[in-house]
Amino acid sequence: EAGVAQSPRYKIIEKRQSVAFWCNPISGHATLYWYQQILGQGPKLLIQFQNNGVVDDSQLPKDRFSAERLKGVDSTLKIQPAKLEDSAVYLCASSPQGYNEQFFGPGTRLTVL
Amino acid sequence: TQLLEQSPQFLSIQEGENLTVYCNSSSVFSSLQWYRQEPGEGPVLLVTVVTGGEVKKLKRLTFQFGDARKDSSLHITAAQPGDTGLYLCAGIDFNDYKLSFGAGTTVTVRA
């Protein structure tokens, strides 16, 4: 069974530029999560989708971050404009509905210069 | 957000030695999970502990959930270089089932 796919794996941009990350969850998984993991910290939930609806985006900085999961399958996370403090690994995870275990992708490492 | 504190932050040991990693909180969780994350990869679930006082074993790894469901420990016996990684604990909230992660313990096992 294929795991969670993310792209790109690495991205370097300058502050004030825009960037987008893509995630394809495990087939059939209804729930999709985006996390931000800053160096030396654990993952912090940014947004949770159930199918194509948002369940929780309370920790998403909505002035610059946006995410969508239009068809209830893959998802994109966008940052516009990026700040230096956005440098982090962005992890996507998915899980079957009603399941506690989350399956994580390899992440996208973002460096903002 | 419920705060989980992990200790120590870093641990470097020789192959064959034992180690223990701790995860503490002032909050009560419905259950608690341990993940291992290797460089360039996402976290991978090792175990979920659900009942206060529960002990689970996974080969050389022993996980314990505190009686009050606020803390947990991970003990590795006879550590091997393949055990090297970032160990993360995550508490699951009673109401919304969200994960709150600790900052992790970086374990290095030297050959």
Image: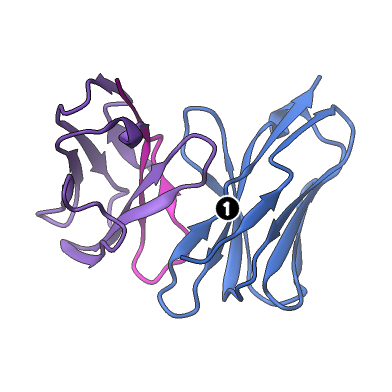
Chain colours: A purple, B blue
Q: Is residue A23 magenta?
A: no
Q: Quadrant of residue B24?
A: bottom right
Q: Quadrant of residue B19?
A: top right
Residue found at x 49% / y 73%: B93
What secondary structure is marked by label 1? loop
A68 horizontally vs A97: left or right: left
Mark 1 residue type: Gly
Residue found at x 27% / y 62%: A30
Q: Where residue A37 sits: x, y (%)?
A: 43, 41
Circle 1: is it few (<14), some (14-19), or many (20+) Cα within 10 Å?
many
From this viewpoint, is residue B57 visible?
no
Q: Is residue A92 magenta?
A: yes
- Output the chain of dot 1: B
From this viewpoint, is residue B17 visible?
yes
Residue found at x 50% / y 79%: B94
Q: In what quadrant of the picture does the N terminus of chain A appear?
A: top left
B53 horizontally vs B9: left or right: right
Q: Where residue A50 sits: x, y (%)?
A: 24, 65
Q: In what quadrant of the picture does the C terminus of chain A appear?
A: top left
Total count of labels: 1
Please say if B88 is above or below B11. Answer: below
The stretch in magenta equals: A88-113
Q: Where residue A104 sits: x, y (%)?
A: 42, 45
Residue most extreme to the left: A70
Q: Nearer the viewer, residue B100 or B62?
A: B100
Q: Which residue is mark 1?
A: B102
Q: Where residue B106 sits: x, y (%)?
A: 66, 36
Please say if B26 is above or below A13. Answer: below
A89 horizontally vs B62: left or right: left
Please say if B104 is above or below B96. Answer: above
Q: Nearer the viewer, residue A93 or B72?
A: B72
Please say if A8 is above or below A44. Answer: above
